[in-house]
Every structure is written in C-alpha cells, then in structure tokens.
Image (spheres, rainbow, N blue to C red):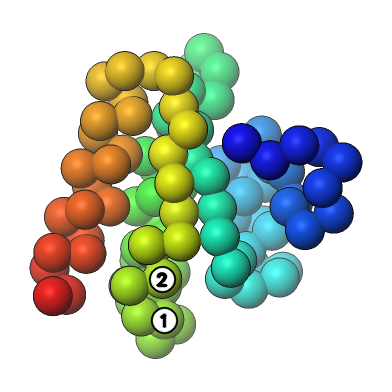
Amino acid sequence: MPRNEDPSWVIVRSVDAAISAIQARGMPQRGSLDFDLGYGQKTGMDFAVWLVEWMKTNGIDLWELMNFTVHSQHPTGRIELQRYLGDQLRAVS
C-alpha cells in the first residue's frame, strides 16, 4: 500500500473523489482498490464498475486493469473486486 508521503500516489477515500481524480488527471499508471469505504458509502465495487465503463467509453484498453491491485481487508469484498476485474480481463482475451 502506498505511503501518504509518496508524491506519485494520489490518495482518495471515496468513490466520488476517485472518479473526480480520474476525470481530472486521466487513467492512472497504477492503482490500489479498497472495497469498504465506510458505512453507507459507495464501495470499491461501485468504483470498479464505473472505471470499466469509463475505460470502454474512452477507448482505453481494459488490459490497463492489470495495473490495479486490491488491498481491501474486507474478505468478501476483496474476492468480489478481484473476481470482477478478472472477469473483465477474461472478456477481452
């Protein structure tokens, strides 16, 4: 997981902030996803679904998803995110 002091990482703590960062800065070279972002909040899965659709809309190769890792400690959420990203990659191979 990146340290807060690392200037090459932009750390966001909500789905809306992550979407805003990508819309403003473009596709990151790498990313680390968490599932559980707080009670009653959108989840990392909401972001992953948005990201895949955004990539398709903007003509970005879905293989760029290989640059994302899942660091979530939520066991079910981690598996769900990993499965979703893997399914997207299998769909383009």
As drawn, the label of residue 64 is 2
Instruction: Please tell me whether mark 1 or mark 2 is closer to you in this view.
Output: 2
Mark 1 near mark 2, Cβ–Cβ under 8 Å? yes
Q: Quadrant of residue 43?
A: top left
Q: Quadrant of residue 11?
A: top right
Q: Is residue 7 above or below residue 83?
A: below
Q: Residue 86, position in %: x, y?
A: 21, 53
Residue extending farthest to the bottom is: 59
Q: Residue at x 62, y 50 (%)?
A: 18
Amino acid at pointer 2: Glu
- Residue 87 visible in the picture: yes
Q: CA distance from mark 1 to mark 2?
A: 8 Å
Q: Residue at x 39, y 18 (%)?
A: 74
The quadrant of the rendering that contains the C terminus is bottom left
Q: Residue at x 31, y 18 (%)?
A: 75
- Identify which residue, 83 or 48, lies in the foreground: 83
Q: Residue 33, position in %: x, y?
A: 49, 41
Q: Residue 67, position in %: x, y?
A: 46, 61
Residue of label 1: 60
